Image: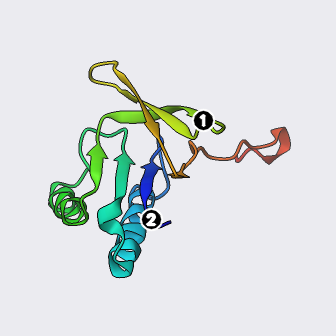
Amino acid sequence: MRSGTAVFTMPSGPIKCAGAPQKIAYLAADHWREQGVLKDIRVVLVLPTPKMFGVPVFARELERVAARYGIEVRTGSELVEVDPDGRAATVVDHGTGAKDRIGFDLLHVVPPQSAPRLAEGDRPG
Protein backbone atom coordinates (compact mmCIF):
# COMPACT_ATOMS: atom_id res chain seq x y z
CA MET A 1 0.00 0.00 0.00
CA ARG A 2 1.40 3.37 -1.00
CA SER A 3 -1.62 5.65 -0.56
CA GLY A 4 -5.24 5.58 0.55
CA THR A 5 -6.95 4.76 3.83
CA ALA A 6 -6.06 1.99 6.29
CA VAL A 7 -8.50 1.14 9.08
CA PHE A 8 -7.45 -0.92 12.11
CA THR A 9 -10.02 -2.13 14.65
CA MET A 10 -10.24 -3.60 18.14
CA PRO A 11 -13.34 -5.47 19.33
CA SER A 12 -15.26 -4.65 22.48
CA GLY A 13 -15.23 -7.10 25.35
CA PRO A 14 -12.39 -9.12 26.80
CA ILE A 15 -9.31 -9.58 24.68
CA LYS A 16 -6.23 -11.67 25.41
CA CYS A 17 -3.80 -8.81 24.75
CA ALA A 18 -5.38 -5.37 24.58
CA GLY A 19 -2.30 -3.87 22.94
CA ALA A 20 -2.14 -6.31 20.02
CA PRO A 21 -4.79 -4.66 17.78
CA GLN A 22 -2.99 -1.34 18.25
CA LYS A 23 0.48 -2.75 17.70
CA ILE A 24 -0.24 -3.77 14.10
CA ALA A 25 -1.32 -0.19 13.31
CA TYR A 26 1.95 1.18 14.73
CA LEU A 27 4.01 -1.42 12.86
CA ALA A 28 2.24 -0.62 9.59
CA ALA A 29 2.61 3.14 10.12
CA ASP A 30 6.30 2.74 10.87
CA HIS A 31 6.78 0.66 7.72
CA TRP A 32 4.96 3.26 5.63
CA ARG A 33 7.07 6.01 7.24
CA GLU A 34 10.26 4.13 6.33
CA GLN A 35 8.96 3.74 2.75
CA GLY A 36 8.24 7.49 2.58
CA VAL A 37 4.51 7.02 1.93
CA LEU A 38 2.93 7.56 5.37
CA LYS A 39 2.07 11.13 4.40
CA ASP A 40 -0.15 9.69 1.64
CA ILE A 41 -2.01 7.25 3.89
CA ARG A 42 -4.86 8.04 6.27
CA VAL A 43 -4.50 5.65 9.20
CA VAL A 44 -7.62 5.20 11.37
CA LEU A 45 -7.51 3.24 14.63
CA VAL A 46 -10.95 2.30 16.03
CA LEU A 47 -11.01 1.48 19.75
CA PRO A 48 -14.09 0.61 21.85
CA THR A 49 -12.42 1.85 25.05
CA PRO A 50 -12.72 5.42 26.35
CA LYS A 51 -8.91 5.78 26.34
CA MET A 52 -6.15 4.19 24.31
CA PHE A 53 -5.19 1.91 27.21
CA GLY A 54 -6.46 1.21 30.72
CA VAL A 55 -3.15 2.03 32.44
CA PRO A 56 -2.67 5.82 32.37
CA VAL A 57 1.12 5.83 31.89
CA PHE A 58 0.79 3.50 28.89
CA ALA A 59 -2.19 5.44 27.54
CA ARG A 60 -0.18 8.67 27.52
CA GLU A 61 2.71 7.05 25.68
CA LEU A 62 0.41 5.42 23.11
CA GLU A 63 -1.26 8.79 22.49
CA ARG A 64 2.20 10.22 21.72
CA VAL A 65 2.99 7.32 19.40
CA ALA A 66 -0.30 7.71 17.51
CA ALA A 67 0.25 11.47 17.20
CA ARG A 68 3.81 10.96 15.94
CA TYR A 69 2.51 8.74 13.12
CA GLY A 70 -0.52 10.93 12.44
CA ILE A 71 -2.92 8.12 13.32
CA GLU A 72 -6.55 9.19 13.66
CA VAL A 73 -7.73 7.50 16.87
CA ARG A 74 -11.45 6.88 17.39
CA THR A 75 -11.94 5.97 21.06
CA GLY A 76 -15.32 4.85 22.36
CA SER A 77 -16.08 3.57 18.86
CA GLU A 78 -16.56 0.22 17.22
CA LEU A 79 -16.75 -1.37 13.79
CA VAL A 80 -20.37 -2.43 13.22
CA GLU A 81 -20.53 -3.19 9.50
CA VAL A 82 -18.24 -3.97 6.59
CA ASP A 83 -19.24 -3.48 2.96
CA PRO A 84 -16.55 -5.50 1.16
CA ASP A 85 -17.80 -4.67 -2.33
CA GLY A 86 -17.98 -0.96 -1.56
CA ARG A 87 -14.72 -1.17 0.44
CA ALA A 88 -16.31 0.72 3.34
CA ALA A 89 -16.40 0.20 7.09
CA THR A 90 -19.15 1.62 9.29
CA VAL A 91 -18.00 2.78 12.70
CA VAL A 92 -20.35 3.80 15.52
CA ASP A 93 -19.40 6.32 18.19
CA HIS A 94 -20.86 4.83 21.38
CA GLY A 95 -20.96 8.25 23.05
CA THR A 96 -23.14 9.94 20.44
CA GLY A 97 -24.59 7.01 18.49
CA ALA A 98 -23.32 8.64 15.29
CA LYS A 99 -22.28 6.31 12.49
CA ASP A 100 -19.46 7.09 10.09
CA ARG A 101 -18.87 5.20 6.86
CA ILE A 102 -15.14 5.11 6.13
CA GLY A 103 -13.88 4.03 2.73
CA PHE A 104 -10.82 1.82 3.02
CA ASP A 105 -8.00 0.43 0.92
CA LEU A 106 -6.83 -1.78 3.78
CA LEU A 107 -8.98 -3.09 6.63
CA HIS A 108 -7.51 -4.94 9.62
CA VAL A 109 -10.29 -6.43 11.75
CA VAL A 110 -9.73 -8.16 15.08
CA PRO A 111 -12.77 -10.35 15.81
CA PRO A 112 -14.51 -10.53 19.18
CA GLN A 113 -12.88 -13.06 21.48
CA SER A 114 -14.10 -15.46 24.14
CA ALA A 115 -12.96 -18.54 25.98
CA PRO A 116 -13.71 -21.84 24.25
CA ARG A 117 -16.85 -23.64 25.36
CA LEU A 118 -16.24 -26.83 27.25
CA ALA A 119 -17.91 -30.04 26.18
CA GLU A 120 -20.30 -31.54 28.79
CA GLY A 121 -17.74 -34.16 29.93
CA ASP A 122 -14.88 -31.65 30.06
CA ARG A 123 -16.22 -29.53 32.91
CA PRO A 124 -13.73 -29.14 35.76
CA GLY A 125 -14.56 -30.35 39.22
Q: Farthest residue in the bottom direction?
A: 34
Q: Secondary structure at mark 1?
A: loop
Query: How many labels, in total?
Result: 2
Residue situated in front as seen by the camera: 34 or 99: 34
Q: Residue at x 28, y 47 (%)?
A: 73
Looking at the rendered image, the disc whose residue lies closer to the viewer, 2 or 1, is 1
Instruction: Say if 32 sits above or below 10 in the image.
Output: below
Crowding around mark 2 (Cα neighbors within 10 Å: few <14, some 14 to 19, many 20+) is some
Q: Residue at x 22, y 65 (%)?
A: 65
Q: Which mark is residue 24?
A: 2
Q: Position of residue 68 (x, y in %)?
A: 19, 66
Q: Are marks 2 and 1 in contact (CB under 8 Å)?
A: no
Badge 2 amino acid: Ile
Q: Which mark is residue 118?
A: none
Residue situated in front as seen by the camera: 96 or 11: 96
Badge 1 amino acid: Gly
Q: Identify the mark nearer the N-term, 2 or 1.
A: 2
Q: Which mark is residue 86?
A: 1
